[in-house]
């Protein structure tokens, strides 16, 4: 990481609480946690926003939209984390392998492909989205609230990925170790995964 985070033994109660919650979630202190240690209120605001977005979506769709955005943003950390969530939280290893290997999602069903394509478009150039692009999602059965959710998932991912990459935060070695070498290579779309 390019900045110096406060030493864990000297942090105030807010940062200690932030670290403890991250450690409880992951089983270790993830590399992204110290990036927010200087502004724990921002970390909490991000968590609240992310949970609000995810709370309105079916979890698998949230992960697909997030993975598409993470790839577009070239965020290895988010690509790896959300492929892990797709596999572990959603119990969908086969889809995880498909989306890790192929950004087009050509082997997914048409609705999943449309969601991923749209999330990619939002991440790459939201100003290029047209009414026809939105209609395409409607044609795949998404209502306007669900379309808004995909936009929110892709757009909110920009904040987290940009913070981590701008501060030089690498995906955790422990996260990388949850994948075989092929998937680990496939999810490395930007900064390399930490090696220690």
Image (cartoon, helix red, strand yellow):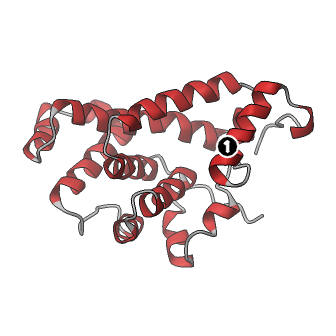
Residue 32 visible, this orientation: no
Q: Quadrant of the N terminus?
A: top right
Q: Residue furthest front?
A: 24
Along the line of sight, the residue nearer the viewer: 91 or 174: 91
The residue at which mark 1 appears reads as 22
In the image, residue 31 above or below residue 14: below
Q: How many marks?
A: 1
The residue lying at 17 percent from left, 30 percent from top is 144
Q: Is residue 131 left or right of residue 75?
A: left
| Tag 1 secondary structure | helix
The residue lying at 23 percent from left, 36 percent from top is 146
Residue 157 visible, this orientation: yes
Q: Is residue 165 left or right of residue 151?
A: right
- The quarter holding residue 3 reads top right
Q: Is residue 32 left or right of residue 58?
A: right
Along the line of sight, the residue nearer the viewer: 36 or 71: 36
Q: Position of residue 27 (x, y in %)?
A: 69, 55
Q: Position of residue 116 (x, y in %)?
A: 29, 51
The residue lying at 54 percent from left, 41 percent from top is 161
- Callout 1: few (<14), some (14-19), or many (20+) C-alpha neighbours within 10 Å? some
The residue lying at 39 percent from left, 50 percent from top is 63
Along the line of sight, the residue nearer the viewer: 108 or 92: 92
Q: Position of residue 6 (x, y in %)?
A: 86, 34
């Amino acid at each position: 990481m390019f900045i110096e985070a406060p030493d864990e033994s000297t942090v105030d109660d807010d940062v200690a609480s932030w670290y403890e919650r991250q450690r409880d979630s992951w089983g270790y202190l993830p590399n992204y946690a110290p990036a927010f240690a200087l502004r724990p209120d921002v970390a909490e605001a991000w968590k609240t926003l992310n949970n609000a977005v995810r709370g309105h979506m079916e979890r698998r769709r949230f992960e697909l939209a997030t993975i598409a955005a993470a790839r577009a943003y070239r965020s290895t950390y988010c690509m790896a984390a959300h492929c892990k969530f797709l596999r572990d939280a959603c119990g969908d290893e086969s889809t995880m392998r498909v989306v890790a290997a192929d950004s087009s999602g050509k082997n997914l069903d048409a609705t999943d492909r449309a969601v991923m394509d749209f999330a990619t478009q939002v991440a790459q150039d939201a100003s290029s989205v047209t009414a026809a692009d939105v209609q395409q999602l409607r044609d795949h059965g998404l209502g306007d609230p669900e379309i808004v959710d995909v936009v929110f998932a892709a757009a909110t991912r920009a904040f987290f990925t940009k913070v981590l990459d701008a501060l030089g935060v690498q995906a955790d070695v422990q996260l990388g170790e949850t994948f075989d070498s092929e998937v680990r290579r496939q999810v490395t779309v930007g900064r390399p995964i930490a090696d220690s």
